[in-house]
Amino acid sequence: MRFLTYSRIGLALAVIVLVGSCGGDTPAGPVDAPDELGPYAIGYTDFTVVDETRGDRELPVSVWYPVDEEDAADEPLSRYPLDRGITLPSEVAVDDLPVSSDGRRALLIFSHGYGGINTQSTQLMEVLASHGFIIASVSHTGNTTGDESDQSPAEKRVPDVSVVIDRMFERSNTAGDAFEGRVDESRVGVLGHSFGGQTALGTVAGWAGADQDPRVDAIGVIAGGVGEYDFSKEVIAPVTAPTMLLVGTLDPPALEKHRYVFANMPNAAALFKVEVEDANHTHFANVCDIGDLLLSIGITQDEWPQIGAEGLLQPYDDTCTDDVFPIDEAQRIQNKYMVAHFRRYLLGQVAYERFLSTEHADEVEPTVSFEAQ
């Protein structure tokens, strides 16, 4: 992929950030740099959940997870399914390696955008897995690139996430399963992009007729349409889950809605708003990777509508040219704040608070406007 080029050579030394370099009254102790690959190798697998309680609804799931150094391998590198048999190659993940035996791992669930794919944010998935999380990305059947048959997808979103949590817990409690004994049921987070950001907030606030899932401890909302129409002040005011809101300033609808949530969720145990200057809605997804891949295999932009990729045309032109905010930088910032947020509020690693402050952003992130409450 074009924007995941970190080397694992000397990783144990290279990613250590000492408290003295950050200044201020931040918690002491070394941490793994949250905008780099973490200390674990990365495994990948996929499977399908069948929800018998909802008419045998089938939900494809992709899972990234940490792998111990002694089990790491360089090949065969994973290839992520897109559509029509096209796959996106990874530079770092390998299929079906053993899940890290270094204790039970916190579980994250990722929800894709409206009419999207569950491999839309693979770079973020890989980085989170390298930092020790098991992350399962659900494909919301009927509301994907290849299948937009669902006329009321919102009401199915939160239940989809809940059934994937159920299934990952079941796998952890099933003898002989690859995830046996690997999932920490007391540490669950949800994050999502765009419509998936609404899904993430819905898991802790309730949404579209679905109740909140009490197992979800922290969330990340990326460019989410989390406005008052879907989430009234009365609905979001009781939310206590630590929440990270991340959005680009060239995404006016989402920017306004993030500011609305930030102003009206006073009971959250922690609430952060990250605004990335000159980033747009699709700076936080794989649009450039996917577009570059299509071009590299000889599918020109004129042909994209013929393969169902017409919706990629405008985002690619808006996000992937040399005269716009670099997507590599937007992805780095996204990685940094999501990793720091979940390591602090799911894993309880207080040292990551140093990255979650206005002072830190002012010192080292000139394109970021950061607020916390």
Image (cartoon, rainbow, N blue to C red):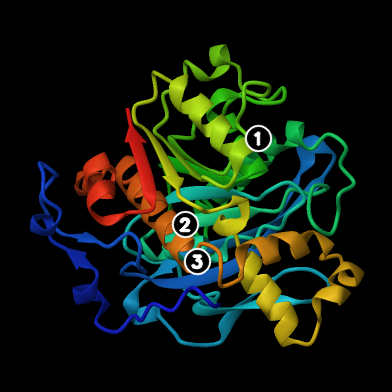
Q: Which residue is mark 2?
A: 134
Name the quadrant containing residue 81.
bottom right
The answer to the question of whether label 3 and label 2 lie on touching residues, with beta carbons closer than 8 A, is no
- The residue nearer to you, when weighing 111 against 262, is 262
The three-letter amino acid code for the residue at tag 1 is Val
Horizontal relation, residue 220 to residue 289: left or right: left
Name the quadrant containing residue 299.
bottom right
Marks counted in the figure total 3
Q: Which residue is mark 1?
A: 158
Horizontal relation, residue 255 to residue 337: left or right: right
The three-letter amino acid code for the residue at tag 3 is Pro
The residue drawn where x is 37% and y is 60% is: 132
Dot 2 falls on a residue whose secondary structure is: strand
Q: Which mark is residue 326?
A: 3
Dot 1 falls on a residue whose secondary structure is: helix
Judge the density around disc 2: few (<14), some (14-19), many (≥20) Cα neighbours within 10 Å: many
